[in-house]
Structures are given as structure tokens and as C-alpha cells.
């Protein structure tokens, strides 16, 4: 035990108060300053503005993501996406089906190819007992109206037209092998049936039907008759001359 008093006794150092006060002052300096009421209001306003901006951005994104709204996408011309889109656009332009699934482009071509034409038959005049050429309306399809007109001519009058006295001198087994138009002349190549029962006025009427039907079109003034690819000077058992282009009678 330490002995009180005496020379050898050591003095006990009493705690210094100075450093404690310094520590206390440091703590006091580090404590946050009280927030003023005005700063709280400004912070609340800033938060409210930020929330409004976020809400507006979300609404705009939802608007552009709805069906029917397409966002513009920028793609480079050399990128695969651009090439695929360009390829799809070409296909869409070439094949644009309507509501019924019909190809519009094909439909337009068909509409252009459909034409109203006339084919020439005969009708007996009971008073004069003569037959007169009579034009009858037909509608044909195809790129060659002359070919369509010849086919309608060979098909002959309808039942209703026959009932009204309309006749034709064209044989039913007649066929057109080819048509060539050059220098306002139509070269029509028929099979051998064109000479069938070709006697007297029957063959003349037959040729008149062909010539008047073919020369109704612009750019055709005459007809050259061929049989199985060969041009003939005469046809029929009576040797009816067909030398040179045949034209309408004046």
C-alpha cells in the first residue's frame, strides 16, 4: 500500500479537464444544424416535380407502346434489318391482297385486258330473203383482242340469239392456229376446217364474218387467210380467190 506523506511518496496525477472540454466542443461542432422550415418546403417541391416528370414519361411511353402506334426505328442501309424490311416492302408492293384475298395487281391487269368487242353474224331478212351482217356485242379477256374475237366468232351465237334468227357460217371445229399483225394487216392462220362445206355463198359469208370482225380494231385494215401455216391463193371447192389482203366491202 502506498504510504501517505514522506519523501518517497509519489503524487497521483489528477485528471486534466482541458482535453475533455476540447472533445466536447468537437462533438458540438460535428452535430448537424437544424433544418429550417423553408428548406423542408423546397425539398418537398423538388420531390413533387420529379414525381410529375416521371409520371409524364411513363404516360408517353405507354402511349407509344399501344397497338397501332409504331415507333420510328433508324436502321442503316447495310444492316440486315434494313435489307429484310426493304425485301418485305418489295413483296408487299408486288402482292397486295385485298379483303377477299385477291391480288390487286393481277386484278388490275385483268381489268385492263377485258374489252367489249363485236362479232359479226348473219340475220335473215324475211322480206328480201337475204342475209345481212349483224354485229353482236361480246366481252373478251386476254392480251390479244383479235384472238378473243375470233374465238367468240367460232363459238357462234347464243341460244337466245339463235331464237331471234341470228345465224353463223363458221364451222364449230374451226380453230385459230396463230395471228400476226404487221403493216395494218392481220395474218390469221386457221386449220383445214375453214374449207369445210365451203361452197358458194357459205364460204363468202364465212370470209365476210372473219374480215369484218378482225377489221373492227384500230390498226387493222385487211386480213390474210392462211391454212395450216401456208398462204393460199384460193380456198374451197369453187376456188374462191383469197389472193391479197381481204378488206371490207364498200
Image: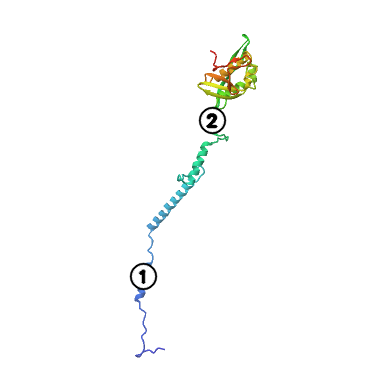
Give the number of marks.
2
Q: Does residue 209 lie above or below 105 as drawn?
A: above
Between residue 122 and residue 14, name the one nearer to us. Answer: 122
Between residue 46 and residue 211, name the one nearer to us. Answer: 211
Find residue 41 and name its label. Answer: none
Near mark 2 (Cα within 10 A), the count class, few <14, some 14-19 or many ≥20, is: few
* Residue 107 appears in the picture as rendered: yes
Counting from the top left corner in percent of width and height, residue 147 is at: 57, 24
Q: How is the image coloured?
A: rainbow
User: Which is nearer the N-term, disc 2 or disc 1?
Assistant: 1
Tell me the distance, in whole angstroms, between the alpha carbons under discs 2 and 1.
96 Å
Residue underneath mark 2 = 109
Counting from the top left corner in percent of width and height, residue 109 is at: 54, 30
Residue at disc 1, secondary structure: helix
> Which residue is located at x 50 percent, y 39 percent?
90
Q: Does residue 216 lie above or below 18 as drawn?
A: above
Find residue 26 and name its label. Answer: 1
Residue at disc 2, secondary structure: helix
Amino acid at each position: 500500500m502506498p504510504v501517505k506523506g514522506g519523501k518517497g511518496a509519489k503524487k497521483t496525477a489528477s485528471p486534466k479537464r482541458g482535453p475533455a472540454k476540447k472533445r466536447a466542443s468537437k462533438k458540438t461542432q460535428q452535430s448537424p444544424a437544424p433544418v429550417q422550415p423553408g428548406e423542408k418546403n423546397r425539398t418537398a417541391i423538388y420531390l413533387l416535380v420529379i414525381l410529375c416528370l416521371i409520371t409524364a414519361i411513363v404516360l408517353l411511353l405507354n402511349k407509344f407502346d399501344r397497338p397501332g402506334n409504331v415507333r420510328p426505328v433508324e436502321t442503316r442501309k447495310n444492316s440486315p434489318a434494313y435489307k429484310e424490311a426493304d425485301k418485305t416492302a418489295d413483296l408487299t408492293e408486288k402482292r397486295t391482297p385485298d379483303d377477299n384475298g385477291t391480288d390487286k395487281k393481277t386484278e388490275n391487269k385483268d381489268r385492263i385486258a377485258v374489252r367489249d368487242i363485236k362479232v359479226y353474224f348473219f340475220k335473215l331478212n324475211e322480206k328480201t330473203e337475204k342475209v345481212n351482217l349483224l354485229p353482236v356485242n361480246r366481252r373478251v379477256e386476254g392480251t390479244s383482242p383479235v384472238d378473243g374475237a375470233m374465238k367468240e366468232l367460232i363459238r357462234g351465237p347464243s341460244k337466245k340469239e339463235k331464237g331471234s334468227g341470228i345465224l353463223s357460217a363458221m364451222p364449230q371445229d374451226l380453230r385459230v392456229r396463230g395471228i400476226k399483225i404487221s403493216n395494218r394487216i392481220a395474218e390469221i392462220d386457221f386449220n383445214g376446217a375453214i374449207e369445210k362445206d365451203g361452197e358458194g355463198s357459205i364460204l363468202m359469208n364465212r370470209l365476210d364474218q372473219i374480215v369484218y370482225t378482225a377489221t373492227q380494231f384500230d390498226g387493222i385494215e385487211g386480213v390474210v387467210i392462211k391454212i395450216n401455216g401456208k398462204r393460199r391463193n384460193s380456198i374451197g371447192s369453187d376456188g374462191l380467190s383469197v389472193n391479197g389482203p381481204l378488206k371490207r366491202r364498200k
